[in-house]
Image: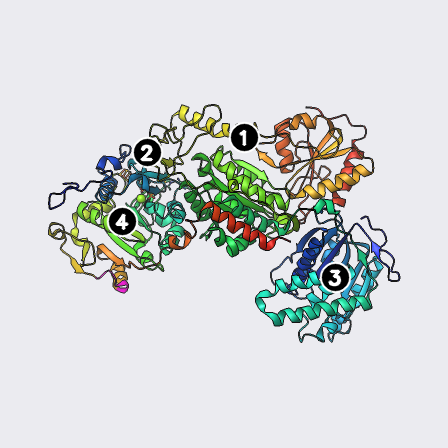
Amino acid sequence: MVDTTTAEETAPRLRLTREHIVEIVSDSGEGAQKAGQTFGTVCARMGNGVWTVEIIPAEIQPPARSPAGASGIRIRLASHTVTNMGDEADIVVAFNEQVLYSRIVNGAYKEGTQVLLEDKWRDDKVPEIREQYAKAVAEFRKNGLIVHELPIEKACLEIVPNPRRGKNMFVLGMLCRIYSRDVVLAKGEIANTFKRKGEKVIDINHRLFDAGYQFAKEKLVLDYQVPPQPLEEREGKRFIVTNGNTALGLGVMASGMELVSMYPITPATSASHYLADVYHEVGGFIHQAEDEIAAAGFAIGSSFAGKTACTITSGPGLALKSEMLGLAVMAEVPLVVCLVQRGGPSTGLPTKVEQGDLLAALFGEPGDAPKVVIAAATIEECLHFVVMARRLAETFRTPVILLTDANLATGVQPYQRPEPSLDWLAPPIDQSDWDEHIPPYNWDSETGLSPRPIPGMSGGQYILTGLAHTNHSKVAYDSDSNQHGSNMRSRKFAALASTLKPPVVHGDEEGDLLVVGWGSTLGAIEEAVDRARAEGYKISSLHLRFILPMEPGLKAIFKRFRKIMTVEINYSDDPDAPLITEETRRYAQLAMLLRAHTLIDIDCWSVVYGHPLQPGMIKNVLTKRLEDLQGETPCSD
Amino acid sequence: MFGLKPDWSLEVFERYFTMGDYAGGEARWCPGCGDHAVLTAAQKVLRDEQQRPEMSVCVSGIGCSSRMPHYLGTYGFHGLHGRALPVACGIKSRRPELDVWVATGDGDCFSIGTAHWIHALRYNMDMTLMVFDNAIYGLTKAQTSPTSPQGLKTNTHPFGAILDPHNPLTVTLGVTNVSFVAQVADWNPPLLYETLKAAYRHKGTGFVRIIQRCPVYSDNFSKELQQNPDRFVLLEHQQGIPVDKSVSRQFPNRLEHDPSDLGRAFQLAADSSKMPLGLLYHNPDAQCYEDLSSQGVAMTPEQRLAGFNAVLDRITV
Ligand SMILES: Cc1ncc(C[n+]2csc(CCOP(=O)(O)OP(=O)(O)O)c2C)c(N)n1
Ligand code: SF4
Ligand SMILES: [Mg+2]
C-alpha cells in the first residue's frame, strides 16, 4: 500500500493518498452492497479509478452475527485505473464484530486497518453477545486493528424506527465525509437508486445520509483525500460503471444478437437479469429454457435459422450443454457461449471464483471438437468480447466459448462507454437464392471456411446432421469423408490463428521470469509484476485472450526468459506436497496446455481458495520462485 | 387439375410444387416399415398445401424415424437423441414464418426427451409434431421403450418388458396449454394424411402419436393391432378429422367425440381397452410462444443501434 500513515491515530489531519480500500461488512440484508455500490459510483463520477467487489456469504440464509454470514462489499478507489480488488483494506465499517472474523481469515485486513464498528452489542441484553463483543474488540485491538466503537444504529433511530434498514445510507454519509465526496452527487445517486420507491423514501434516505455525514464530521478524526485520475486520462471520455455480467449483457446487445437462451445458474444468471430489464429496447428476447440442454438446443435452432444466438451459463451448465456443443462443432453452427466460471467440480463453490473450466471448455465434448475459446481479462472486455465472439462464430461457422468468472461477474468498475456502430451488429439475414450447385459445406480446401445456406434461401435446402457427412451434408461413414470433414473443421482455427498478432509482454521483453495468465487475474498479476520490478526483479508477464487458437509467437517470447510459470485460479499440485514428484505432479490448466504447445518446461502456481488473487500474494510467490531459480540453468526445450 | 379452377380459368402460381420438390434422398428404412407411409403422407400434405420447400424445416432427434429429414426436399436438422424439440422451438423463436415439422421416436420423445416433450407442449409453438411410436428402440436394435407393452421380448428384457407401458396421451393431455392431440396408425393412409394435414393447419403444436409398424423388432405389437381393428375406437366429429366412409367402415368401434372436450379426451386416452384414433383434443386459441419470443424481430439494425445507445446513455456517468 502506498499510504503508510494509517497506523497511528492522530488529531484531525487531511491525509493524501494515491489509493484506499474500504469495506462494509454486515449480516446479509443490511444493505451494505447498495451503500458500497453507490459510494463506488460517486468515486467513479468524481474521476477516481474504482474497483468494487461484493463479499458474498457462504450460505443463503446464514444465522445473524455469524462469520459464515459475512456479506458486504469492498471498494478500492485510487488516483489511477484500478484493475483488481487489491490486498488489505484500510477502512472497514462493520455492523457486528462476528462477520469480521471471516474477513480476517481471508487476510482482508492488516495492522492499522481502521475498524468502524457498531457498538450496540456492547450493551446487548443477551450476556453471551456482550461477552462475544468485548472479547472480539480486545482481540482485534491486540492484533493491531484500530477499532472505533460507534453508535450507528442509535444515531439512525432518530430518523427511522428500524435502523436495520437505513443504516447503510447513514454509513454512506459517513464515508462521503471521510473521503470528502461531492454531497450533491451522492444525493443524486441516492435519488436515482430509490426513484421507483417515491419521494418519501428518497427523503428519508437523504436524511440518513446527512446524519451520517454530520456524525463522521463530529465524531471521527478520519479524513482522507484520494485525488482523481489526471484529467488528461479522462478528458473527452465518457464512462459507464458496470460489473462483468452487465457487461456481457451489454455485449449481447452491442453484437446485435437477438436471442439469449439460458437456464438460471450462479454466478451467470445476473447477466440475464440485466438483459431481461432492457433487452426489449433493442428487440431481443430471453428464453428461460427447461434445462441447459434445451437452452443450448434452442440457441442452436435459432442460429441454424440464421439468427446467431447466445447462451450464458456456468460450469455445471456447460457440462449439460456439451453434447449440444459437439453437435454445433460437427455441423458448424455459429453459437456464442458465455461461461461465467465458478468453483468446481460438481456444485462446488457456486458464488466463488475459479478458472477451473478451461480444459472443459476446450475438450469437454467426446471426439475432436475444436471451437474458438477466448477469455475476457477485464470487465470492459466482457462487453467487447461478446461482439467479437458473434463475429467469429459467424465468420468461422463455429461455436465460440467466452470465458469469464465470478470475479469479473461481480466486480464493478468504470470503463469507457462503447461507441457502437452498425457494423457491430449482426446484419439482417440473407434470404436471396442459393446457387443449388454450391454444397452446404463448400469448404475452401486451404482454410476450411464455407458459407452457409439459411432456411428461406431457395435452392439451399440441406439436412444438417450431427453424423459424419460430406460437403453436401450427406451422411457418410467412409474413411475419407470423416478424415476430410475433421480436417476442414480443424483447419478453420489455423486460418483464424494466422490473423492474430503475438501478444504483448508487460514489462521487459526478456528477463528471469515470465508470468503467464489468462482471464480475470490480469490486473492482480500485472500489479504484482510491477511491484516486483520496482524492487529490481527481472519479471514480466503475458496475458492470453485467445486459448483456441492459441496466440502466435509464444515459444519465441518464452525463450527470452529463464523461467516461465503460469498463475491461475484452479487446482494444481504443490510441488512440495507429499508424494508429489515431477512425474505425479498435476499442473494448472493453462500450464498443461502451454507445456504441450511449446514443449517448454513451464511451471505454475495456482490455488482454489475461492477468492480472487491478491497482488501482494502473487508478488510473494513470484519473488520466492525467482530466488529458488538462482543457480538453476535457463529453461530450454 | 392443378391450378385449374372449376370455371376452367387458370390460376397461375408463381411456382407450382410437385411431390418431387419434397423428395430428398432415397428412404432407407426396412421394407414394411411404417415410417415410409408417414413420409409419403407428410410429403402429400406439403404438396397439397403448396408449402414452399425452402420455408420448411424438418427437425428430428436420433432413431430410425429421425432419419425422416434426409428423405425430404425441405431444410432439415437431424440433431441429437431426444433433443429435436428445443432445436425446433429455437428455429421458430425468431423465424416464426418458417414451417416446422418434428420427427421423433417413442424413445426419443417419451424417454430421453421427456423434459422437452412436456415443455414444448406448453410453449405450443406452431409446428407439426409426429411421434413415431413403434414401442421399441429400432435404431439401436430392440431395446425396451417406455411404450413397449408388458411382456414384449426385447434385448434389454429378453423375458419380456417388466413394466406397464407408459401412456403418452394422458401425459400429453395433462400439459398446460396443450392445443392439439391426435392418434393415428401408419397403416391407415387416409386417416394419417388427414390427421397430419389438420396438425399442419393448426396454429400451435400439432401433436400426433403415430402407432408405427416395426416388422423387424416389434412385429407382435403392431400386428396384433393391425389384425384387430376392434382394439381401436374411431373418433368422429364435425370438428374432428374428416374421414371417408370407406375408412370409418374399417372400424367396428366409432364414437362421436367433441375435440374441445378435454375431460372426455382424457377419459378416452386413459381407457386401455380401446385405443382412440383421430382427434382427441383441439384448442385453436391456445397461446403460442413464438408470438412472444419473436418480439422485436422486425426492428432494423438502425433501430437496434438507437435502442442500445439509449440503454448506454442511462448508465453513462
Ligand atoms: C445421448 C444418446 N444416448 C443414446 C443414443 C443411442 N440411441 C440412438 S437412437 C436410440 C433409441 C431410438 O429409439 P426411438 O426413439 O424409439 O426411435 P426408433 O429407432 O424406434 O424410430 C438410442 C438409445 C444416442 N444416440 N445418444
Ligand atoms: S428397424 Fe424397425 S423402425 Fe427401424 S427402419 Fe426397420 S422397420 Fe423401421
Ligand atoms: Mg421407437
- Residue A150 position, x and y percent, is 78, 68
Label at residue A176: 3
Reading the image, the residue beneath label 2 is A459
Asked whether mark 2 lies closer than 8 Å to ligand 2, one says: no
Distance, label 2 to label 3, CA atoms, is: 67 Å
Q: Residues within 10 Å of mark 4 (few under 14, many from 20)?
A: many
Q: Amino acid at mark 2?
A: Gly
Q: Secondary structure at mark 4?
A: helix
Front-lying residue, A428 or B189: A428
Looking at the rendering, the stretch of residues picked out in magenta corresponds to B258-263
Residue A471 in view (yes/no): yes
Front-lying residue, B277 or A462: A462
- Residue A264 position, x and y percent, is 51, 53
Q: Amino acid at mark 1?
A: Leu
Q: Quadrant of residue B100?
A: top left
> Could you tell me which chain the residue with mark 1 belongs to?
A
A382 sits to left or right of A281: right
Q: Residue at x 57, y 29 (%)?
A: A499
Distance, label 2 to label 1, CA atoms, is: 29 Å
Q: Compare marks 3 and 1 and give the one earlier in the sequence.
A: 3
> Could you tell me which chain the residue with mark 3 belongs to?
A
Q: Compare marks 2 and 3 and give the one earlier in the sequence.
A: 3
A214 sits to left or right of B58: right
Q: Compare marks 2 and 1 and give the one earlier in the sequence.
A: 2
Q: Residues within 10 Å of mark 2 (few under 14, many from 20)?
A: some
